[in-house]
Image (cartoon, helix red, strand yellow):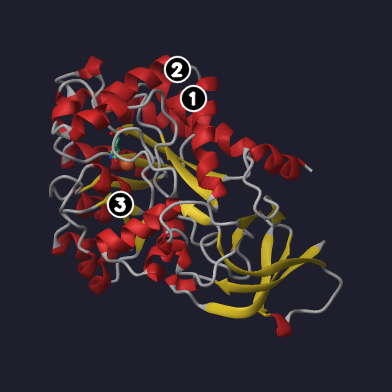
Amino acid sequence: MTYTLWFNCHVATMQDGRWSTIEHAAILTGAGRIEWVGEYRDAPGGTHQRVDLGGAWVTPGLIDCHTHAVFGGNRSDEFQQRLEGVSYKEIAAAGGGIASTVRHTRAADAASLYRSARRRLEHLMRDGVTTVEIKSGYGLDLESERKMLSVARRLGDTLPLNVRLTCLAAHALPPEYAGRADDYIDYVCDVVLPTLVAERLVDAVDVFCESIAFSVPQSERVLRRARDLGVAVKIHAEQLSSLGGASMAASLGALSADHVEYLTEDDVRAMAHAGTVAVLLPGAFHMLRETRQPPVEWLRKYGVDIAISTDLNPGTSPALSLRLMLNLACVQFGLTPEEALAGVTCHAAKALGLSETHGSIEPGKVADFVAWEIDRPADLAYWLGGQIPNRVVWQGRLLTPDTDTSGLSRWEHQHDA
Ligand code: DI6
Ligand code: FE
């Protein structure tokens, strides 16, 4: 086996959600895994390929654990309406919102969905993302949900990116089921989930539990069905109101409850008990001009792990930078830069059920990491957008040479080589 020693760097391992920094460090990789990490002077001997990282700070590859990156159309028109005072709920009630994206997504062919999603993912990847979760939920029938998840899987097959697939068929009520939400839930449970799970297009199942979407009992039916099919579960909950969806999902052992601005202290206790991660989505909070902040103090007090994600979607969070979300999580929600970075590494891995293999720089884990030209790790949460020169190592292979940001053609070239 060929080993590579990555040296002349400092490392924020993010082990157990802490910086756990090692200065004057080196990392030894082989067969796509991390073999060893420590101070350079203690590095194992042998004839390794050597890569000089030029004094960079190395973090785990960033993990965006909640996106709706595959969709047709765009909703900047609704953005304008909202700025003029029309609410998200009013837009949804008038046939816009998610329903508008469903129309465009159903009408789009797989090739165009692939092309547009790929462009969005390129932004994330240049900014250090090596793992991304992509949800369905703009198809809302078997064929269109399958189309979305197949596109997501193809993105994972063709890009140097680990893609996790989440079925969110219970995202909204499709027009053909208007007034018949329980019948749609039957269809999701009896047809959509079993079929797509059997086709291996589903790593996890999600549901939008909210007054404008599905009730707690309806959401529970979907998640129980998923569990019976042997698939992990998660939930969009407590975003606009407090319904108890997060507690219900925690009682089913959910990987994560996402948004969660309106969590009660009892919900937080239930999540702590179940080990359910709280995924905070500051892009949606910002775009909707929400004022209710997630209860970060309770999450800390009860030891609920906090993840941060873009929620990349055309309606409430057209966010193309996970790093910008770090800044928003610190400034808007009061996280420390250390907590924010844990939220896109260690705890984001946990929110995807990937704690064993991803999210920190430790022996045995997949060798996904980023070497950043920064002075200290907090810089990642400090700059508002922009491009921080970085080099991405994915499964032990260097993807971007120096500051090259010219796109993926070069990445793919190296990837294929
Ligand atoms: N919560 C969200 O953040 C997205 N879906 C959801 O349930 C928003 C989806 C959209 O507006 O298109
Ligand atoms: Fe979402």
- Residue 354 lies, in percent from the top left, at 49, 56
Hey, which quadrant is residue 236 in on the image? top left
| Identity of the residue drawn at 55% across and 53% down | 128
Q: Does residue 264 appear left or right of residue 114 in this picture?
A: left
Q: Earlier in the sequence, mark 1 or mark 3?
A: 1
Query: For the residue marked with disc 1, what is the amino acid?
Result: Leu
Hey, which quadrant is residue 172 in on the image? top left
- Residue 190 lies, in percent from the top left, at 33, 27
- Residue 332 lies, in percent from the top left, at 26, 59
Query: For the residue marked with disc 2, what is the amino acid?
Result: Ala
Q: Are marks 2 and 1 in contact (CB under 8 Å)?
A: yes
Query: For the residue marked with disc 3, what is the amino acid?
Result: Pro
Label 1: few (<14), some or many (≥20) within 10 Å?
A: many
Q: Earlier in the sequence, mark 2 or mark 1?
A: 2
The quadrant of the rendered image in which ligand 2 is seen is: top left
* Image quadrant where one finds the C terminus: top right
Q: Residue furthest bottom?
A: 41
Q: Give the label on residue 108, or none.
A: 2
Q: Is residue 33 above or below residue 47?
A: above
Spatial separation of the CA atoms under disc 2 and disc 1: 7 Å
Spatial separation of the CA atoms under disc 2 and disc 3: 29 Å
Query: Would you name the residue on which mark 1 appears?
Result: 113
Query: Would you name the residue on which mark 3 appears?
Result: 282
Q: Does residue 287 appear left or right of residue 66 in this picture?
A: left
**For numbered disc 2, what is the local secondary structure?**
loop
Q: Nearer the viewer, residue 136 or 335?
A: 335
Q: Is mark 2 within 8 Å of ligand 1?
A: no
Asked whether residue 150 appears in the rendered view, the answer is no
Spatial separation of the CA atoms under disc 1 and disc 3: 26 Å
Q: Give the label on residue 327, or none.
A: none
